[in-house]
Image (cartoon, grey):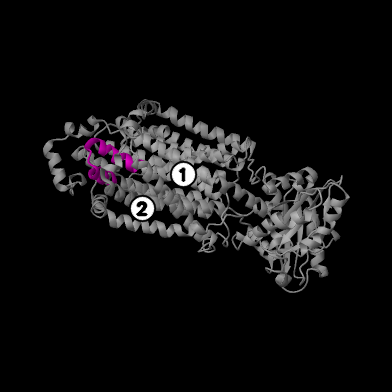
Amino acid sequence: MAALARWCVRRRLVVVLLWLLALGGVSAAAAVTGSAYSNDYEVPGTESGRATQLLQDGFPHLGGDSDTVVWHLASGSVRDADVEQTMTATLDKIADLPGVATVVSPYDDAGAGRVSADGHTAYATVTFADSAEDIDASEAKAVVDTAKDAEADGLQVELGGSAVALTESSGGHVAEIVGVLVAAVVLFLAFGSLAASLLPIATALVGVGTAYAGIGLLGHVMTVADFAPMLGMLIGLGVGIDYALFIVTRHRRGLKRGLSVAESVENAVTTTGRSVVFAGATVCIALLGMLILRLGFLNGVAIAASLTVVLTVAASVTLLPALLSLIGMRALSRRERRRLAEHGPEPELPTGFAHRWSAFVERHPKLLGGIALLVITVLALPTLGLRLGTSDQGNDPRSATTRQAYDLLAGGTSRAERGGGFGPGVNGPLTLVTRVGGAEDKLLLDNLDATLRTTDGIASTTPVTYDTGGDLAYFTIVPESAPQSQQTSELVDRLRTEVLPRAETGTSLDIQVGGTTASYDDFADVIVGKLPLFVGVVIGLGCLLLLLAFRSVGIPLKAAAMNVAAVAAAFGVVVAIFQWGWGSELLGLGRAGPIEPFLPVIMVSVLFGLSMDYQVFLVSRMYEEWLETRDNRRAVRVGLAETSRVINSAAVIMISVFLAFVLSGDRVIAMFGIALAAAVALDAFVLRTLLVPALMHLLGGANWWLPGWLDRRMPRISIEPPERRAAHERLTDVVEQDAVEQMERERDEDVRDIPG
């Protein structure tokens, strides 16, 4: 690390130029090739996956995205001549638009049943030639604009579907801008230097920007979800600014001690820079743990997020040193530079609130530890009610046309109440597909709709459709409940385990149930089944790294427990807001609904990685003091006092960045933002600065216990070695003893001097 730091300082202009070229080159390549994101939730081997494959084989024309145009009259009928004329002309225009394959109107024979019983609402189906991920946003926008042009007094036109969702405003880059601005303010308040406060942001933006463009290229070679770039940016900005903050803080400390700019940069990279690399490695290991699930959808997310972390870490230990050497002494504020010139180097002792808090925790470890544990437990309780499932466009904000189309179609919630709509199930019908062996199979299929119509939870069925050879058939079922409803999931289970097996008796039929709800339920089942292995691997690898770094059994075990606590509490907050709906509408996040099946896996990966960061930065300073003094109380007291301020500043920055992503307008990204912000807040302000030091005081020397036989067999690595003794003692070479004594008389009591 020292050699790397020296090279970056000597070749600072080259380093800056190389990073700018990388950013520009990758961004240009991404702009030329375009994006190729895909939200493919299908899991090979599941029943919904087999149903999708059968449909693609026998009915390739069904592969295009299907969207709806809904129109509604508060008074009058959609069958009135003027309304029918207006909407027929509109649908004809839509049919002629680029990318549109077919349009089925309720005024045609093929669209029978698409007018509500009260005559106030009707809908048409617009099928695109391509699937949603391959549709150009401009094509979808043309459909929306054409349909909206038909609106008039009393006639409301709304649109729903995956392609239409592409046109919904995502808030642009407001989230990123707000997060960066808040981070800049916090950094300026912490440093008092404009140059020093801008460097962490510049470093993070270059690393994240390069990764953002790189993820776009990655989508051309593997399945990458459309939210992966935003997720990567969310994580990258948070950790990137924080990593740079830690390095700049150590650099500023070195300058105040009298080191030259080059010496201070080298010292910061070889000490804190090592911690940054280690922390980034733990985040990547946690993210790449998703690969053991062997799900293509999550593989792309894991690699995309890991790429972002790798580039932010690389920027922190190469680009940042180069920039620090360029600004020289301006890393300190004017007042700090003036004080340094007038009084010479000064030791930076932990005083003020950090000093008092550290001593307070030492005096009351049982009380404070109990309070912290109670807070975490209460926040984690909602996690027990976590329900995985599909959120749909009924969860969109009220102002969205997709939400209004959903509500118009849904109308009532049962057959008796559906006069004002078609029932919520029409927003997510189930598709039943099977191979057909002969005349007996066809006879049963033709009569099966009578059986299904009497099944609880089914609102309607469509006639059976056969492929050209008559070897494959499908039909759709409209549930009485919404796609995200627990009742719809129960209907899927009942069809698969009771209704269809009885109907198939004596035939060669093997009817597969697919559709939105079935796909999400299958996806959730696969994830839940593999989750214990995944969590075990992530925790195990994290504990192994900490065991090697701190040569202690207790430190890794406490870290694992703290990480689980942070994850559970963060999920409790997510469940309360998104599943229970506590404030979700006020935040513009739509109505309550289930939690996406992939969220737990991604969140466990990210949260375990981020939680490990603060553990590393806090305990590494304690470990350094322990190695020098072998006094546990002093080690915990000094480590907390010297790191709590920078950890809290870093946490405020990360929380601000994460919460800003609520403004993105995307429900999934908002879930990530709130979960990460809650986890970091709890981790920094409750766990790392309260519960962890309290436990370490209670455990005493047992914190650092390691069996002798294990100690002899383990390789020796170091995260953040103690600073060179010469650097610590440099003050005595440049400052007169009487000046030092005068400074110390003017200071508060040093936390190191408290009797242990």
| Marks 1 and 2, how far apart at CA | 20 Å
Instruction: Examine the rendered structure and indicate whether residue 24 appears above or below residue 509.
Output: above
Report if residue 217 is visible in the image.
yes
In the foreground, 693 or 64: 693
Residue type at mark 2? Answer: Phe
Residue 52 x/y as whole percent: 72, 46
Identity of the amino acid at label 1?
Leu
The earlier-in-sequence mark between 1 and 2 is 1
Is residue 655 at least partly visible in the picture? no
Disc 1 residue crowd, few under 14, some 14–19, many 20+, Cα 10 Å = many
The residues colored magenta run 616-640
Image coordinates of residue 235 in percent, x first then y, are 48, 44
Q: Secondary structure under badge 1? A: helix
Task: Please tell me whether mark 2 sits on a helix, a strand or a loop.
Answer: helix
Question: Looking at the image, which is closer to me, 264 or 45?
Answer: 45
User: Do the numbered discs 1 and 2 sit on residues whose CB atoms are within 8 Å?
Assistant: no
Quarter occupied by the N terminus? top left
Q: Residue at x 50, y 63 (%)?
A: 583
Q: Residue furthest bottom?
A: 75
Quarter of the image for residue 381 reads bottom left
Residue placed under numbered mark 2 in the picture: 685
Residue at the front extreme? 506
Mark closer to the observer (1, 2): 2
Disc marking residue 391: none
Q: Tell me which secondary structure the magenta stretch mostly adopts.
A: helix
Which of 696/529 is in front? 529
The 10 Å Cα crowd at callout 2, few under 14, some 14 to 19, many 20 or more, is some
- Does the segment drawn in magenta span residue 634? yes
Numbered tag placed on residue 237 in the rendering: 1
